[in-house]
Image (cartoon, rainbow, N blue to C red):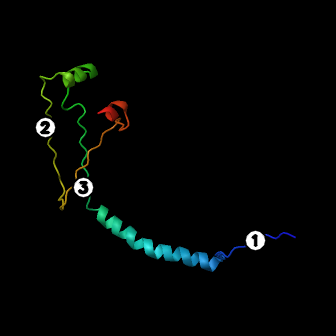
């Protein structure tokens, strides 16, 4: 006669009392984290300046020609007005749309 081998293992019994206690413990732990996150996010200053057409004028082909022309100045000056007081340190993030890092030209460079 062959019997199934049974190895010792943890077999928790999920009673309603145990499950509710576990959810309450998780709630007590994560509510202060949520409150701290909300308080920290109130100080974030977000300014969006989309300058697609500000520095290069004309049609798409004229913009490409201007970018490829070595004699044309590629300097673009933008002025941003911050209306809210900012605390140090100040981080600046830059977003590029329709740009993929694993693009073949990027990989070759």
Dot 3, how many residues are within 10 Å of its Cα: few (below 14), some (14-19), or many (20+)?
Answer: few
Q: Earlier in the sequence, mark 3 or mark 2?
A: 3
Q: Which residue is mark 1?
A: 5
Is 34 displayed left or right of 20 in the figure? left
Residue in the picture at 23% in, 36% down: 51
Image coordinates of residue 104 in percent, x first then y, are 37, 31
Q: Quadrant of the N terminus?
A: bottom right
80 horizontally vs 10: left or right: left
Q: Are marks 1 and 2 in contact (CB under 8 Å)?
A: no
Placement of 38 over or under 66, stated as above or below:
below
What residue lies at 49% left-to-right and 73% top-to-bottom?
A: 26
For residue 45, the mark is 3
Q: Residue at x 26, y 21 (%)?
A: 59
Query: In the figure, 60 relative to 97: above or below?
Result: above
- The kind of secondary structure element at disc 1 is loop
- Please determine whether, in this image, residue 3 is positioned above or below residue 90: below
Q: Quadrant of residue 109?
A: top left
Q: CA distance from mark 1 to mark 3?
A: 62 Å
Earlier in the chain: of badge 1 and badge 2, it is 1
Q: Dot 2: few (<14), some (14–19), or many (≥20) neighbours within 10 Å?
A: few
Foreground mark, 1 or 3?
Answer: 1
Instruction: Determine whether, in the image, residue 89 is placed left or right of residue 12.
Output: left
Q: Secondary structure at mark 2?
A: loop
Q: Nearer the viewer, mark 3 or mark 2?
A: 2
Whole-number angstrom distance, CA of label 3 to CA of label 2: 21 Å
Residue 28 coordinates in the image, percent (x, y): 46, 76
Instruction: Quickly name the residue at label 2.
Output: 77
Q: Residue furthest right?
A: 1
Towards the viewer: 38 or 92: 92
> Cα distance, mark 1 to mark 2?
75 Å
Tell me residue 8's x, y (percent).
67, 76
Query: Which-is-in-front pick, marks 1 and 2?
Result: 1
């Amino acid at each position: 006669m062959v019997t199934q081998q049974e190895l010792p293992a943890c077999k928790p019994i999920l009673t309603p009392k145990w499950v509710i206690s576990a959810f309450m413990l998780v709630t007590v732990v994560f509510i202060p984290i949520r409150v701290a996150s909300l308080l920290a996010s109130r100080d974030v200053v977000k300014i969006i300046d989309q300058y697609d057409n500000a520095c290069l004028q004309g049609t798409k082909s004229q913009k490409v020609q201007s970018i490829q022309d070595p004699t044309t100045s590629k300097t673009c000056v933008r002025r941003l007005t911050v209306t809210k007081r900012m605390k140090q340190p100040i981080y600046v993030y830059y977003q590029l749309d329709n740009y993929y890092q694993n693009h073949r030209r990027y990989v070759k460079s």
